[in-house]
Amino acid sequence: MLFPTFTFAAFFAVVLPVSWVVRQHATTWKLFVLAASYLFYGYWDPRFLLLLAGMTVVNEIAAIAIHRSANDQVRKVVLVGAVLFDLVVLGFFKYYGFFLDSLDSAFGLSGPALNVILPVGISFFTFQAISYVVDVHRQDCPPAPLLDFAVYLSFFPQLVAGPIVRATEFLPELRANRVPDSLETGRAVVLIGRGLFKKVVVADFLGRAVVDDAFGTPGEYGAVDILTGIYGYAIQIYADFSGYTDMAIGIALLLGFRFPQNFDRPYAAVSVQDFWRRWHITLSRWLRDYLYVPLGGNRQGRSKTYRNLMITMGLGGLWHGAAWTFIVWGLLHGGALAVERLISEFRGEPDIEFDAADVRIRELARLHSGAEVDAWREDPTSPVPFSPLEVRRLWLGRLVTFHFVCGCWVVFYAGTIEGGGLSAAGDVFAGLLTGWTQAPELLNPLVALVIIGAIAVQYVPPLLGRQLSAMFSTLQPTVVSIGFAVWIMLVVALGPEGISEFIYFQF
């Protein structure tokens, strides 16, 4: 069930009002939302509802056992068992064929050829289940009642493509019993409308107009078209994934939940480290807190720090898909992070923990206090006076980072196509070295306008978005409804026919 479809609109048109009618009755509300979430997930394939329910029960039993045991060794054994269970489930459904092919090519070993279907969203709810039992073990949160945990793990706005919300963020929201005010409604409308535009008008248009052809048959096009396809895919994957996130956060807001931010203008990043502070923020901080830091972080010397960076980013790449191209993509980013760290050391800059995402203490404090959420961090684009040399370094960093990320996206895309691999990425890169005299076929003024406009928007101050939300909150509900309906019609008119699946559904 895709967000920008009439099917989901009909589904949500029933869920939203009923949810607020029964909101004051906590148990009834939780049962209703749980049923709605299972209906949403089962719409693809009802068989996987058993998988989701099984993951819920096993991790809840493990969390209770960890919490009740006074023996540290027993607690650790239960934790390891629960995490292994989650990883085995994820590994079987997502990586069975990959490991089988790898064993066959490396050692000539073969195993039973099973037709394993990948459940939608398994990577996301598996990571949420792991973070829950780990947080209980760390005593960051007590085990929740089974019904609460079931709602947390299956909550439909973010079930299939994130953001990866932690139990320590979701469960307090579940108990808050908060009614959204006009400001929250205005912010939700802006987020949903923005997400629809990103997905339908930007992502789907670029995919069909340039990316599919440039990457699918690079030998048929010149270097200008190939370069356009690379830029186009960078925008497409951002607009597609952040568009889903915007809609998920907006839908959750209408249901009374505030989700953490997942994107923060990533193509305005001044370094690869800064990029991972801005791209898929909830995954970045998950990798930091549940993988990089437990491996030792940067506390065990330079060589082990680089090792931990490479392991973290390599496994982060593997999380995205069962192909060597994803691992290479992650290792490329890990290598860039290591190089940036080495340069910082030579410059004598402070030795800080690798921070794949902002801690956002202030944001979380305001989140649970009921105040408006705003991302707070030092921002290179803020109106701070820079010297001419600093300005040049700032924009050089952005230029180099953006093109490094774009080059890595070529490797990433190769893993998303059937039969693709590093050779497919090589074909795209080879196309950049030849054919500069060939006239472009895919590049046209509209494609150029969309790509340039999408990059330019990355430099719009976030304050404008908050001001727009505040403006919507002052309007009458009738005016908001009419304005949103007109926006939907505009999106439908500008977008291509039909809605493609979100890119991250396959991860």
Image (cartoon, rainbow, N blue to C red):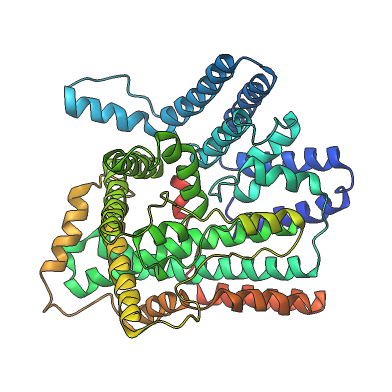
Residue in view at x 34 percent, y 60 percent? 349
Residue in view at x 70 percent, y 59 percent? 366
Q: In the image, is residue 230 above or below residue 419?
A: below
Q: In the image, is residue 81 above or below residue 337?
A: above
Along the line of sight, which residue is nearer the eye, 231 or 43? 231
Q: Is residue 155 visible?
A: no
Q: Position of residue 153 (x, y in %)?
A: 63, 38
Q: Quadrant of residue 478?
A: bottom right
Q: Position of residue 497 (x, y in %)?
A: 49, 68
Q: In the image, is residue 374 above or below residue 284?
A: below
Q: Quadrant of residue 75?
A: top right
Q: For the C terminus, give its image quadrant.
A: top left
Residue in view at x 63 percent, y 29 percent? 56
192 on left or right of 112: right
Residue in view at x 68 percent, y 58 percent? 251
Along the line of sight, which residue is nearer the eye, 245 or 506? 245
Along the line of sight, which residue is nearer the eye, 337 or 148? 337
Q: Quadrant of residue 88?
A: top left
439 on left or right of 101: left
